[in-house]
Image (tube, rainbow, N blue to C red):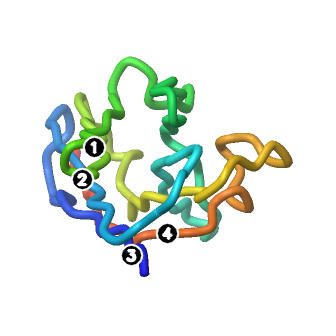
Amino acid sequence: QAQLVESGGDSVQSGGSLRLSCKVSGNLGKYYCMAWFRQLPENELEAVAGIDESGWKLYAESVKGRFTMSKDTSTNTLYLQMNNLKPEDTSMYYCATDLRPDTAYSWYETPRYKLWGQGTQVTVSS
């Protein structure tokens, strides 16, 4: 059974950097999109960054220029490099995959994603 396992969360000062990892284990089949989400205070999930099978990357406006998403196909690992972190970036971060193409939802919509990791906590202090 496929699993996603996040790591790399930590506590940092404002302006600092972190790199989150999402290790894919098991057989995902042919996924179309993978993404990073973070939890908002209202328990909603906000899409932070997404990458499709061809490598096309998309970012939320709030993180453009600061966060970079990448994947290493040799190790089946998805990364999120986060630079110039701000206190408002504090959250639990999750990676997710849709497992198959789903044109009913955009990359930033949670119903698209069928497999989620357990999350990793990022805390940014001012």
The amino acid type found where label 1 is placed reads Tyr
Give percent across and percent down for residue 39: 51, 62
At 38% from the left edge and 18% from the top edge, which residue is drawn? 65
Q: How far apart, in angstroms, are the residues tagged by discs 3 and 4? A: 7 Å
Label 2 is placed on what type of residue? Answer: Ser
Query: Quarter holding the N terminus?
Result: bottom left
Dot 3 corresponds to which residue? 118
Which circle's residue, 2 or 4, is located before the other in the chain? 2
Is 94 displayed left or right of 114 in the figure? left
Which labelled disc corresponds to residue 21?
2
Of pointers 1 and 2, the one earlier in the residue sequence:
2
The residue lying at 56 percent from left, 26 percent from top is 61
Name the spot of residue 96 as percent of width and height, x first. Answer: 50, 59
Mark 2 touches mark 3? (CB < 8 Å)? no
- Closest to the observer: 70 or 88? 70
**CB within 8 Å, label 2 to label 4:** no
Q: Amino acid at mark 4?
A: Trp
User: SS for tag 1?
Assistant: strand
Tag 3 and tag 4, C-beta contact below 8 Å: yes
Of pointers 4 and 1, the one earlier in the residue sequence: 1
Please tell me which of labels 1 and 3 falls first in the chain: 1
Label disc, if present, on residue 112 of the rendered structure: none
**Distance from the alpha carbon under mark 2 to that under mark 4:** 13 Å
Residues 82 and 32: in front is 32
| Residue at image location 54% in from the left, 51% down from the top | 31
Whether residues under marks 1 and 2 lie with C-beta atoms below 8 angstroms apart, the answer is yes
| Residue 79, label in figure | 1
Task: Find residue 86 and report its image quarter.
Answer: top left
Three-letter amino acid code at the position of disc 3: Gln
| Disc 4 target residue | 116
Q: Distance from label 2 to label 3 (Cα)? A: 12 Å
Residue 3 horizontal/vertical position (percent): 38, 74
